[in-house]
Image (cartoon, rainbow, N blue to C red):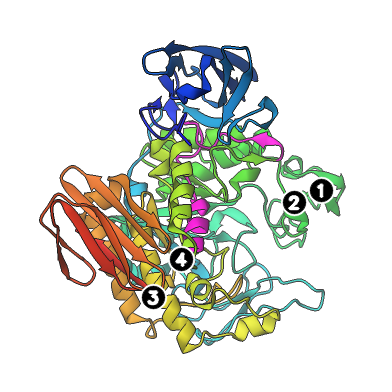
Amino acid sequence: MKTIFDPRDKSYKTPYGAVPCGTEITITLRPDREERFAECSLLLFEEFADAYWEVALTPNGDEGLFTGSYEAPEQPELIWYGFRLRRAGGEEVWLGQNGLGPEKDMLRWQQTVYDDTLSTPDWFGRGITYQIFPDRFCRTSIPDPAGMLGDRVVHQNWDEGMEYLPDGQGEIRNRDFFGGSLAGVEEKLDYLKRLGVNTVYFCPIFEADSNHRYNTGDYEKIDPMLGTEEDFRRLCDKAHALGIRVMLDGVFNHTGSNSKYFNANGEYPGPGAFQSQESPYYPWYAFLFWPNRYDAWWGVKTLPAVNETHPSYMDYIIRSENSIIRRWLRAGADAWRLDVADELPDEFIAEIRTVMMEEKPDSFLLGEVWEDGSNKIAYDQRRKYLLGRETHGLMNYPFRVAALAYLQGGDAEDFMEAMETVRENYPRAAFYSGMNMLGTHDTPRILTMLGTSPHEPPADRTARAEYRMTDEERTRGLHLLRAGAVLLYTFPGSPTVYYGDEAGMEGFEDPFNRGTFPWGREDQALQKHFALLGKLRNVRVSMQSGELRWLWAKGHVLAFAREEGAETTVAILNVGTEMEEVSFPWTKHLASDAISGQQFVAVRDRMTIRVPGMECMLLI
């Protein structure tokens, strides 16, 4: 069937993808002459303005085309559009993403319109990010938990398993610690530099009574098991001297119940909101019946939710001269990652960005969103994360989902289609500033996912805790992880490594994905692979910011180019078990695989390569 309209093809729509406010957008329809359409109208709906409008397209009798243009709104907007066509006899038919049909079935296309007046720092997307779960990365000594918040237990043996079973009350409290610290990270900065890391992203480091610290006790204080503010400042200074920036995790949707703000356990001097309605923090929380019934994140009583838009909370976190956002940027942080950004009001996020620009103009704001952030609906509201006034970029979970499906045996074309949808919907700066990852503290270890697929994990929690991959599973996982790393480091956005993935760590879901780093027992071959990719990413501008061009996406084989000026880098992956042949244009005479050192010769400006099963190449 002839293509009537393809918004990704500039012969049908210009400019491509998301556009700045006020941009003129030109549309061309190319229907089959046999359809005998006499009229065509472009139908548009502005979601935030709640406005419908229509643009008549002009027919071109000689070529059978319909052409027209419209000006994007002056304010950031999501436009949903389709077409109504009318035949000479008066019969009407509608055109949407799902083809020609009745109006009720029309699936409209998305047009993102964003504010481009606020710039996005490009350092994050160009560089490599390393995510650290602070308690489990590196310790310099065994800490004494006496006098620290909560009832903490410290493992004496760095290599032993973590606690994972509920306590006597049926709750998993995450109170066992291994003692990783900021000093430990400082000790390993040279290691991170050798990996090519440009940004360290810390899971929460503020005082809290759990090992994950997503239940903040005091935003103004580094957890004493991690160190002090002086330790943090020194770490930032040393990281900056090595060209490494620091990203902090901001958990602003909720606090811990055991915090100086809520103080349910009475461990702080008080008074917290749980203790007194006269507390300055009482208005931050929504009590159904004070003090025991209150709104909590996903109903978890140890995580009381806050009213982010209450003026005193906004002042404390964002607006005041010594706000939490400001003070830690001054202390050395370069970026904030917003935990559960879905649950933060648009105005709250926008104000954080404004204050960050005032305090440190080159700082970066990242949001945790698990879906396509351009059209996300959260709590019945369409969100505006990427329309130019809120986050600079998002965690690119759509990349992880599509990459994992492909690496586990899916079709390369499905990966390409998923990424093209994101590329089309996101502003360019946001697409190139995504945090791309294969694993995080919220997902099973990528090596386990790839090695044990397609088998179901053990149903029993203890069995999952004790599970170790067989030699066959580990070999399979390592082959696929090497390929996944090439995909990760070559794709637009910041390649993000969850601590220890480069060392061959394994484990199922939380907390089994949060083991201690295996210093001295790393998979050295895998580490060298990641280090090589890190070096290439840092020296090749095409891998940092080059245009993306798909070369091959069929079955198990995926190939794409990144191009910047005269420099081209091509990633080739074969995740099947059989040898596959891939062919694509190549105007130079030779190409070298940066991984194996093998050279290939082009014939008549075309490169044809036979790629072994479960292998990957990086042509330069």
Residue at image mark 1: 276
**Is the C-beta separation of discs 4 and 3 under 8 Å?**
no
Cα distance in 3D space between marks 1 and 4? 54 Å
Q: Residue 54, position in %: x, y? A: 57, 14
- What's the mark number on residue 241? none
Element under label 3? helix
Mark 1 / mark 3, whichever is N-terminal: 1
Amino acid type, label 1: Ser
Mark 4 / mark 2, whichever is N-terminal: 2
Part of the protein shown in magenta: 379-405
Cα distance in 3D space between marks 1 and 3? 58 Å
Element under label 4? helix
Amino acid type, label 3: His
Element under label 2? loop
Cα distance in 3D space between marks 4 and 2? 49 Å
The answer to whether residue 89 of the structure is visible from this angle is yes
10 Å crowding of disc 4: few (<14), some (14-19), many (20+) = many
Residue at image mark 3: 479
Give the residue at x 48% y 53%.
414
Mark 1 / mark 4, whichever is N-terminal: 1
Amino acid type, label 2: Gly
Indicate whether residue 392 is drawn in magenta.
yes
Residue at image mark 4: 407
Cα distance in 3D space between marks 4 and 3? 10 Å
